[in-house]
Image (cartoon, grey):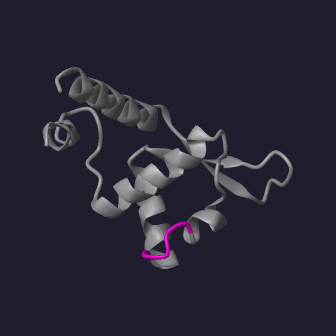
């Protein structure tokens, strides 16, 4: 319960853009790829979650780019392929959650 309370509080702190639930879900899924040192392509992202239509995913990707959370990076082998990479803002976002998780475990 404490963790969920901290997460809710952290998401309302200034300095990071507000994300809707679908943006948050996609960003978390991208982070799982980034954690494995892989940047998914935009095409891969369109089918990343069976519960979200490709059109909705594209709109949310556009929203995450507009909010400065992700950026496109050209594939080094094929310039036509765009990969989804984190920005410094996204890294700060996940660092905040890392601190929250650490805090929740210290106070159990």
96 to the left or right of 34: left
Kindly give the residue lying farthest to the right in the view shown: 77
Residue 8 appearing in the image: yes
In percent of width and height, residue 37 lies at 66, 39
In percent of width and height, residue 51 lies at 43, 76
Q: Which of the 4 quarters of the picture holds residue 99?
A: top left
In percent of width and height, residue 85 lies at 59, 44
Give the vertical position of 9 relative to 72 (above or below).
above
33, 20: nearer the viewer = 33
Give the vertical position of 38 relative to 25 (above or below).
above
If the image is split into quadrants, where does the C terminus sit?
Answer: top left
**Residue at position x 14%, y 37% from top?**
2
39 to the left or right of 68: right
Per the rendered image, the range of residues in magenta is 48-52
**Residue at position x 41%, y 34% from top?**
89
**Residue at position x 53%, y 47% from top?**
32
Q: Report the predominant secondary structure element of the magenta stretch.
A: loop
């Amino acid at each position: 319960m404490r963790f969920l309370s901290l997460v809710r509080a952290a998401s309302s702190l200034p300095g990071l853009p507000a994300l809707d639930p679908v943006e948050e879900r996609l960003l978390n899924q991208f982070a799982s790829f980034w954690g494995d040192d892989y940047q998914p392509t935009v095409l891969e992202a369109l089918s990343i979650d069976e519960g979200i239509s490709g059109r909705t995913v594209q709109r949310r990707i556009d929203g995450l780019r507009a909010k400065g959370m992700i950026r496109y990076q050209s594939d080094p082998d094929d310039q036509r392929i765009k990969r989804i990479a984190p920005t410094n803002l996204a890294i700060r976002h996940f660092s905040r959650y890392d601190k929250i998780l650490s805090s929740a475990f210290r106070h159990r």
